[in-house]
Image: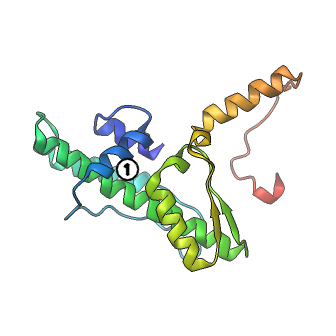
């Protein structure tokens, strides 16, 4: 969602993950752009990218001359913002994932969903896992698709097998994993 919002803000299209990563990889190196990393307290496994998205919005807004009107200046500015944004998101994701492994005494981490296709996430994960003594696994790229698409695919398969929902469900936003 954060990648999608930033891609939209920068006019890069949808889905955001692949276009932000492509622009970030094309950046020649970010100097002077540092976006916040929200860790939400020592040993917290929670994360939020709302502050980061706001920081990107303000950065672009305050430098509107670099992001409007086309030309190489705009392209380079967009690439640099994508690189700095991606670094901030992935630093938090990787650190939280490794912290979760440490807290729960888990030695194997499996990363899935659309974000698992991100090459820098893979690189950072393998690097951090090596130092933490954790095995990290990613699916083949062809299986790293959007979670909504995977859920829809699973739902269709279950529907074809005769599974039906009563549709009388309630959302439980604070349900603990151990309660599921």
Element under label 1?
Answer: helix
Q: Classify 176 as above or below 160.
A: below
User: Seen in the image, is 79 located left or right of residue 48?
Assistant: left
Q: Classify 161 as above or below 140.
A: above
Q: Where is residue 82 in the image (x, y as percent from the top left)?
A: 31, 50
Of 1 and 86, nearer the camera is 86
Which residue appears at 60% of the width and 72% of the height?
Answer: 99
Which residue appears at 69% of the width and 34% of the height?
Answer: 151
Which residue appears at 37% of the width and 50% of the height?
Answer: 53
Residue 165 visible, this angle: yes
Q: Where is residue 134 in the image (x, y as percent from the top left)?
A: 64, 73
Q: Position of residue 50 (x, y in %)?
A: 43, 52
Mark 1, Cα crowd under 10 Å, few <14 / some 14-19 / many 20+, is many
Residue 58 visible, this angle: no
Which residue appears at 67% of the width and 71% of the height?
Answer: 101
User: Seen in the image, is 146 located left or right of residue 56?
Assistant: right
Q: Name the residue under label 1.
A: 53
Of 146 and 42, nearer the camera is 146
């Amino acid at each position: 969602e954060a990648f999608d919002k930033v891609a939209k803000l920068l006019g890069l299209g949808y889905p955001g993950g692949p276009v932000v990563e492509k622009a970030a990889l094309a950046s020649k190196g970010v100097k002077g752009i540092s976006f916040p990393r929200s860790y939400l307290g020592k040993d917290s496994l929670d994360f939020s990218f709302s502050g980061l998205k706001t920081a990107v919005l303000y950065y672009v807004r305050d430098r509107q001359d670099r992001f409007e009107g086309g030309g190489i200046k705009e392209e380079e500015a967009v690439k640099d913002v994508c690189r700095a944004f991606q670094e901030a998101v992935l630093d938090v994701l990787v650190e939280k994932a490794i912290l979760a492994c440490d807290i729960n005494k888990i030695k194997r981490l499996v990363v899935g969903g659309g974000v698992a296709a991100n090459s820098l996430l893979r690189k950072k994960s393998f690097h951090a896992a090596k130092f933490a003594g954790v095995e990290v696994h990613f699916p083949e790229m062809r299986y790293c698709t959007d979670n909504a698409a995977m859920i829809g695919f699973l739902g269709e398969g279950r529907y074809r097998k005769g599974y039906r929902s009563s549709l009388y469900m309630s959302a439980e936003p604070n349900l603990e994993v151990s309660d599921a």
